[in-house]
């Protein structure tokens, strides 16, 4: 017991800062890789498919509202199939769904955009 409590406290704080720094660097690397590979960060502007909203119904079952080449579709998704349930044709409803997509909460990676 030759170490003082202040030394142990400083050592613990510095270790915590180091671990958080490594985690931040790893998060940055993953974001950078996903952005370069095109597999994350939302749909690209030139992409013909956009997911406007999803709603989870149960384990591995959900509804998705997607825009494909300018048409808005409601899809039922299960592990075995994807079924087109409806096509949204009313302009008012399409505009409302597009507003919902733009005001959607931030993704996990977008929360750390300024990090």
Image (spheres, grey):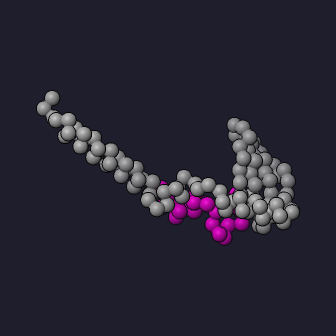
Residue at (76% x, 59% y) in the render = 97
Image quadrant in which you'd find residue 38:
bottom right
Residue at (16% x, 35% y) in the render = 4
Residue 75 at least partly seen = yes
- Residue farthest toward the top in the current orientation of the protein: 1
| Residue 104 x %, y % | 65, 57
Task: Determine if the magenta segment contains residue 86.
Answer: no
Span highlighted in magenta in the image:
30-51
Quarter of the image that includes the C terminus: bottom left
| Residue 28 x %, y % | 44, 57
Residue 79 at least partly seen = no
Quarter of the image that includes the N terminus: top left
Residue at (22% x, 38% y) in the render = 8
Residue at (36% x, 52% y) in the render = 21
Residue 86 shown left or right of residue 4 in the figure: right
- Residue farthest toward the bottom in the current orientation of the protein: 46
| Residue 77 x %, y % | 75, 46
- Residue farthest toward the left in the current orientation of the protein: 2
Residue 4 shown left or right of residue 98 in the figure: left
Q: Nearer the viewer, residue 31 or 89?
A: 89
Q: Is residue 73 above or below residue 46?
A: above
Q: Nearer the viewer, residue 96 or 110?
A: 96
Image quadrant in which you'd find residue 60:
top right
Task: Determine if the magenta segment contains residue 42.
Answer: yes
| Residue 102 x %, y % | 67, 62
Q: Is residue 56 above or below residue 38?
A: above
How many marks the image carries: the answer is: 0
């Amino acid at each position: 017991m030759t170490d003082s409590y202040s030394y142990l406290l400083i050592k613990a704080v510095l270790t915590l800062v180091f671990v958080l720094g490594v985690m931040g660097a790893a998060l940055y690397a993953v974001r950078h890789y996903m952005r370069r590979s095109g597999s994350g960060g939302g749909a690209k502007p030139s992409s013909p498919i956009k997911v406007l909203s999803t709603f989870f119904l149960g384990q591995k079952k959900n509804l998705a509202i997607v825009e494909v080449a300018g048409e808005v579709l409601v899809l039922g998704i299960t592990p075995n199939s994807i079924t087109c349930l409806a096509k949204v044709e009313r302009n008012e409803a399409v505009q409302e769904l597009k507003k919902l997509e733009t005001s959607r909460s931030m993704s996990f990676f977008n929360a750390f955009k300024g990090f």
